[in-house]
Amino acid sequence: MLFDPRIIDAVARARQWSPFLSMLLQREPEMAAMLENGVLPELHSLARDLADMPTPRRLRLERRRLALRVAIGDLAGCDDLTAVTHALSDFADRALDSAIVTAIAERTPDAPVQGFTAIALGKQGSRELNYSSDIDPILLFDPATLPCRPREAPEEAAVRIGKLVVEILQARDGDGYVLRVDLRLRPSPEVTPIALSVDAALSYYESLALPWERAAFIRARAAAGDIALGTRFLEAVKPFVWRRALDFGAIGEIRGISRRIRDHHARGQAFGPGFDLKRGRGGIREVEFFAQIHQLIHGGRDPALRVPATRDALGALAAAGWVDAAEAVALVRAYTLFRTIEHRVQMIDDRQTHHLPTGAALDGVAKLHGLEDANALLDLLRPHVLATAASYDALDPEDGDALSFDRDHLLAQLSQAGFGDGDVARQRIEQWRSGTYPALRSPAARTALEAVLPGLVAALGNAPDPQGAIVRLDRMLARLSSAVNFFRLLEARPALARLLGLILSHAETLAEELARRPELFDGLIDATALDPVADTATLAREMSAGADYQARLDHVRRVVGEKRFALGTQIVSGVSDPLAVSAGYARVAEAAIGVLAEATITEFSGTHGTVPGSELIILALGRMGGGALTHASDLDLIYLFTGDHLAESDGPKPLGAVLYYNRLAQRISAALSVPTASGPLYEIDTRLRPSGTQGPLSVSLEGFARYQRENAWTWEHMALARARPVFGSPAARAAVETVIGDVLRGDRPVRNVVADAIAMRAEMAAHKPPLGPLDAKLLPGGLVDLEFAVHMMQLETGFGLDPNLRVAIAALIAAGRAPSEMLAAHDFLTRLLVTLRLVAPDAQPPRPATQGLVARALGLADWAEVLASLETTRQEVAIWLADVEGVEP
């Protein structure tokens, strides 16, 4: 404890301008003497001499001393806002816990303190309690563990304990009181008892709770009593608070609360004397709501945003890029100032008020704070109030003019929006409004439709194919079970309507996925959705969630679905090169393989153990092996295992190694392919394994090596040229790569590679003709022909042995084994294939509006140049293939 002259000045101001603090200085002469000598006592010393007192009196005296100590530390500038609010909140926790302990002991002596918990909400929950605040706990109990008297129902015991707790904290006598308690934040307070069972509370929050109650739980914390019980409850209720597929109705509800508060407290809205620091326009509540709205939108996907304290939340939102960093700093400064002045107002008379006083009393608040007068205080607050109001007002999207219900007027509006004659769009809109579709029959759905319709029509009218977009939207709405959340998402994020217009105009593949799983659109909320996807390790961490095996399967499907949808949207919106998107698809698939293989192995080993000295390896081939997938690619996989194939697993139900790994491979294939409630994942093709469909699903590495060296056909060695291990330890992967490298460099049967390849290509052409005139894969001179030429050259020369086709071609060019044009040919054909899989999966010419998108994706001027480049590229590939085959073109 050190001398500080600021403390002496703070005491003088307290005596002169705060009747409440002046009274406390008289009631606590020992502390007053220390303070007047410039010494601030330590917080932990305030209750040292109170331990033997009855709990109610001990808490009242401790609260009185704390009120004086915290106020002087605050006024002197020795304690910042965080220290002040933490001290007040920590005392509230201790007091609430002491009251629960005392209540249980009074009713059931010697019973353990269990089965009764207090969940702190509001500022106590976030440790931001203000100087003269009530607390807003929810009292919960567990009927199975709550201490009860003989023949007493747990429900009755819980209510009686709750009443004792409130009485201990709120009762006043000559020493004052401990805390004001407000239990109205519990579920349905008008009809429910003051203490609820945990199961009843969970049932309410999962089915009946209002949107504002979700926001309240952002700041919830198990604060007193049976903390383990409270923690379990909060964990169980977490999905109610943090939703990935957010109901944007919650956002509208929170904004509605703010508007109602503004209307109800209209007399405190105009800034000046009498201004409501908490509820006024630009005040404390709007800073809190600003943070909470963004937390509700993004916190379901980013756990780092689930921080209870307002200023911490603003910092996390800024760090994640969801709010402007400078705006967050300004709001933090404003909040700190507002809360500090709020404390000054409350220090005057220990009243739970948030209004600036008027007249001479406002001068008193200013002078308590250390300012000259009321005008100086208002000048200090004004710019922060105005800036906060502007930030909060900006959260509301601009209101659009409602679309007319009158037919002729509606046609005119649609024509003006870009729909030509507008009749197709009019018919669709009238059908939506009539509630023909199940998703649009409820009043909430039609209200949400009308709210978003002006902006949606404007976005679709500006889309490349307005008529086609609205027809495909109509198909989508016809298939939905509910459209409320979809419309509210578009209302809350108007920029997404433009993306929707592009998707519906161009990408039937994505539009069909959206009709089946509209929650995929939620993934585009993230600012990073249109950025390149992360590396495989980062993606794997994002996918590694789920408390049990089934939850992990569902979670991986959600993440993969969102990533693939976002990658497709990147091409449609023109923000990414299709080559980069193709590599992104492969990274997403590799991460999913790794996460689901690990989860399946863990699940499987619980029953069958592991095979000592052995492990699973997953080998990818084809486009997956080359790290370049399309939106529709399946996964060509081979399952291998290391170690002795005669070994046996060590679990409760042991299996021989061969049976063990075959069953495990079946499980992994199912994990990767079987649809769950969260949608499908990938088609798995294992026909490239040794002996094809006639062979076992998984073979030992030794057996695989022997097969490739002694029995494999030329087409299998060509496939091996794009083989890449995607799961297994580094040592196991290296062992597989050594086998593959040796085989490709010549440790294999001597065969006529060119003759075999020519025969195989002819058979493929006969049984698998091109889908259409734009099939960049199967047309003569397309990607398959390019791959055949590359693989023949790799096997014949040993050059360019890399599973990535682009890298292999570059190496062959550098070695003089391929024409320089082949790299550009690969890039053109791959970009075309990846793009058309989204916008023209039938390989037929797309609509004129989409032809421009394809040209842009390929870096060409127009559709004519696309067709000319396709013809030229096919000729160049055909010439090289013929040269490799030794045949005249």
Image (cartoon, rainbow, N blue to C red):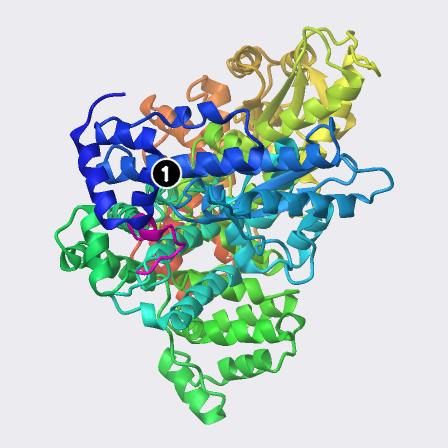
**Residue displayed at 87% across by 41% down:** 151
* 671 sits to left or right of 590: right
Q: Quadrant of residue 14?
A: top left
The verdict on residue 74 being magenta is no
Residue situated in front as seen by the camera: 819 or 365: 365
The three-letter amino acid code for the residue at tag 1 is: Arg
* Residue drawn at point x = 41 percent, y = 39 percent: 64
Q: Is residue 234 above or below residue 613?
A: below
In the image, 724 versus 149, the foreground residue is 149
Q: Does 880 sit above or below residue 252?
A: above
Quadrant in which the N terminus is drawn:
top left
Residue under circle 1?
A: 27
Could you classify mark 1 by the number of other residues whose Cα lies within 10 Å: few (under 14), some (14-19), or many (20 or more)?
A: some
Q: Say whether residue 97 is visible.
A: no
Q: Is residue 134 left or right of residue 580?
A: right
Q: Residue at x 66, y 65 (%)?
A: 481
Outermost left residue: 372
Magenta segment includes 344: yes
Give residue 702's position: percent from left, percent from top. 67, 10
The x, y position of residue 350, in whole percent, is 38, 50
Residue 215 position, x and y percent, is 50, 53
Image location (x, y in percent) of residue 838: 50, 53
Helix, strand, or loop for circle 1?
helix
Q: Is residue 832 visible?
A: yes
Say which quadrant the C terminus sits in: top left
518 relative to 643, above or below: below
Compare residues 137 and 45 and report the one nearer the observer.
Answer: 45
The span picked out in magenta is 343-355
